[in-house]
Image (cartoon, rainbow, N blue to C red):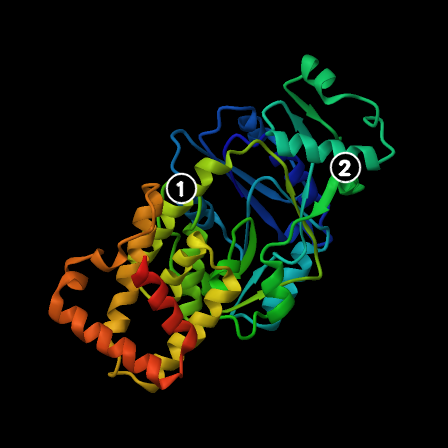
Amino acid sequence: MITHNKYPQNLYSLYALENQTFDPKQMEVILVDDASTDKTPRLQNYRPPFHFRYIRCEQNVGRSKAKNIGIEAATGEVLIIIDAEMILDPAYVKQHVRLHQADPNLVVTGCAKHYNTYTVLDKKFNREQLKLFRRLNRKKNSRYRRLRILRIFKKYSKMRLFKKQSIFQRKYKKYAYPAPFFREIIDRHGAHYEGYHLPYIFVVTHNISVRRSTFDKAGPFDEGFKGWGCEDWEFGYRLYRNGVKIIDNPKVKVYHQEHPRSLGNQTKDALINYQYFFTRHPEFEVGVQSLCWIGKNLLEVNELVIEYKAMVHQHPQQYSHLIQAFPILFDQIFTLRIRNLPVTNLMNASGTMRDEQWKHAFFAELNQLKSSREYPKLVALLESLIRK
């Protein structure tokens, strides 16, 4: 677990780990405190039934390095990586260990049965978070039913809703609601993501598990990522390219505890980090996600990947200029979106694409591809981008 200023949510997460059906004597939990300034350091005195280690970073090292520190310290055969505000279903650890015993070449994710829940009321919640809590609160017969949130915040900046025993009794389900990741993809492609060519997007380290030997195939998290997002996708992509199977475990639920957040900052960080991810792996199935920032969805980009792979496989030498154009166009989309500029004039994205001889060859190949009628989605995409 890595944490930065997530107390007392991280304490609740530890209580949920005490409540696992897996033998606690066979489990170790490593909490990496990435320079928290709240009450998180109190957890160094935490004494659970499992082996527990608290590691403190005196300076903020970021998400990737904090994960690497925890993994380096781990001694177990199966690594479970979770965010510090995740509450795991009591059967979670046992289920994941069983899956890895059956097949050592797995990354197991927890996206289908992902829920959000309220365990702490925080004055810094945004308007949408407060509105949703009021809605959930009205539906429940609880001691907070008639208590106004503003009245709570006059007395507290934070208010815990549960005690330790309540976590054991799973009362956090009272304020939970389903929030699955990529539901439409799982509905279409199933828990093993069959036929989906971007399965690395499910490797979200809010909760995943992987064998140590499998982790070593890909190597540690890339510490070049700054701020929020994409370091887990890049790690997942390396596993995917090494032939590791990525599957979801729909049998156990996970609960993400609501905490104050700024979606605007996260979106900007994610753009910057995704472009960094693309510079590390300038392949079509990575760069194509740039289209999600200009209106495409993840099912549509999968269809583009299918056509692109078929084109490259069937005509490896025929469309070299089109193949060369895609990463240039994708990178320019990222650059313009990061700068909050309109996505236009993409044909002038680089010196290569401004060269008249290169342009002539590009359009000749595009017309040839269009005439073949083999890959209509790729043709439509290219025509759309060069018009911008």
Residue at the image position 54 percent from the left and 70 percent from the top: 104
Vertical arrangement, residue 188 with respect to residue 168, above or below = below
Q: Position of residue 29 (x, y in %)?
A: 57, 45
Quadrant location, the N terminus: top right
Q: Is residue 216 left or right of residue 315?
A: right
Residue 329, picture quadrant? bottom left
The tally of labels here is: 2
Disc sitting over residue 69 in the figure? none
**Crowding at mark 1 (Cα within 10 Å: few <14, some 14-19, many 20+):** some
Q: Amino acid at mark 2?
A: Leu
Task: Check whether the beta carbons of the residues at disc 1 and disc 2 lie within 8 A of each other.
Answer: no
Q: Position of residue 75 (x, y in %)?
A: 50, 53
Disc sitting over residue 269 in the figure? 1
Residue at the image position 39 percent from the left and 70 percent from the top: 380
Check disc 2 and report its element: helix, strand or loop.
Answer: helix
Q: Position of residue 156 (x, y in %)?
A: 67, 16
Query: What is the distance, in whole Å, between disc 1 and disc 2 at their CAs?
Result: 31 Å
Residue at the image position 69 percent from the left and 23 percent from the top: 159
Which residue bears the numbered disc 2? 136
Residue 63, picture quadrant? top left
Q: Nearer the viewer, residue 25 or 248?
A: 248
Quadrant location, the C terminus: bottom left
Q: Earlier in the sequence, mark 1 or mark 2?
A: 2
Q: Amino acid at mark 1?
A: Asp
Check disc 1 and report its element: helix, strand or loop.
Answer: helix
Vertical arrangement, residue 335 with respect to residue 314, above or below = above
